[in-house]
Amino acid sequence: MSRKDTVNSLFMTKLGAPNPPPAQDKERVRSGAISAMGSSLQQLADDAKAASRLQEQLATGQVVIELDTALIDGSMVRDRLTLEVDPSFDALVESIEVSGQQVPILVRPHPKETGRYQVAYGHRRLRALARLGQPVRAVVQKMTDDELVVAQGKENLERKDLSFIEKALFARRLEDMGFERAVIVAALSTDKGDLSRYISVARMIPEDLLIDIGPAGKAGRARWLTVAEGLELAGVAERLTELRASEQFRASDSDGRFALVFGCLTSSATRTERSVIEWSTSGGLKAARVEYGRGKTTLTIDERLAPKFGAFVASRLDELHRRFLEEGGQTEGEG
């Protein structure tokens, strides 16, 4: 027998052909395979639906996810005034460090930068977690600019932690950015009259002074109006500059800083800068009033008591100014 035949005989020895499986067993195997394939396809379908639902929930803000704080930018409009000395923020950091973040923040996908986010509310929690080096729990929701500022304003109002001047500055900033007043009214949950008063006060006080003072939670509209009026007094700018540079001012909290500024602007020394002179006619009628201060001099003539006298004075302003210069006076920018 050749070597080839020997090898063939070894591997081709008939050991007895196995009995073919019954027809029902074949059917069972085929059915099991089809069932397994069906289960896999169903699982894939379920996973796809779950992924789709997750995306929908993320888009509508129905789930909370963790984000790196470095990926989140602030809102387009700041609504808070922050200070170097802020015990309440330090307390928030400590609370989160001990108990964790209890309330998620609200963000939207950044309108201009893919992969980044923009916060609608929760700025303080975001800052606190950034300081701690921890991720932030956030709700991600698609929002327009109008929807973002309305959500930002309403959340702060519900938490009752925005002061009068923060609301006023927030409203003024929104108006400066071109938001319609209807949107600002909704964001602050106020009416048109109050909104006008907010914006009016915020425009009367330089923003750098507001930032230096901070939120001043104890000060309402009336006291801020007093500050605004006091800023117009002659000679007050220099005293305020000295005050703001003082160690006492820098070491004070926001309410303390407001009290110092308020005191500076309402002190007797400041009030003497503003004086009034009443002028009477030869017949003893008080027909004119001259008011000095607030960085200007105001002449008021009562036309009922001195008819046409105001027009007479106005027609001679050139002559009066010439005589003023001849007598050694000087106008800013001349001489």
Image (cartoon, grey):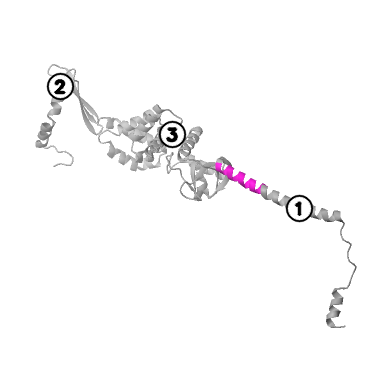
Residue drawn where x is 30% and y is 32% of the image: 230
**Residue contact between numbered discs 1 and 2, judged by CB atoms under 8 Å:** no
Range covered by the magenta-colored residues: 46-59
Residue 104 on image: x %, y %: 55, 41
The crowd level at tag 2 (other Cα within 10 Å; few <14, some 14-19, many 20+) is: few
> Badge 1: how crowded within 10 Å, few (<14), some, or many (20+)?
few
Q: Which of marks 3 and 1 is in front?
A: 1
Residue plotted at (36% across, 31% down): 224
Disc 1 from disc 2: Cα separation: 107 Å
Mark 3 residue crowding within 10 angstroms, few (<14) / some (14–19) / many (20+): some
Residue that badge 1 annotates: 34
Disc 3 residue type (three-letter)? Val
Where residue 179 sits in the image (x, y, percent)?
Answer: 40, 37
Is 66 on the left or on the right of 184, as rendered? right
- From this viewpoint, which residue is outermost toward the bottom? 2
What quarter of the picture does the N terminus occupy?
Answer: bottom right
**Residue designated by label 2:** 308
N-terminal of the two: label 1 or label 2? Answer: 1
* CB atoms of marks 3 and 1 within 8 Å: no
Q: Is residue 181 visible?
A: yes
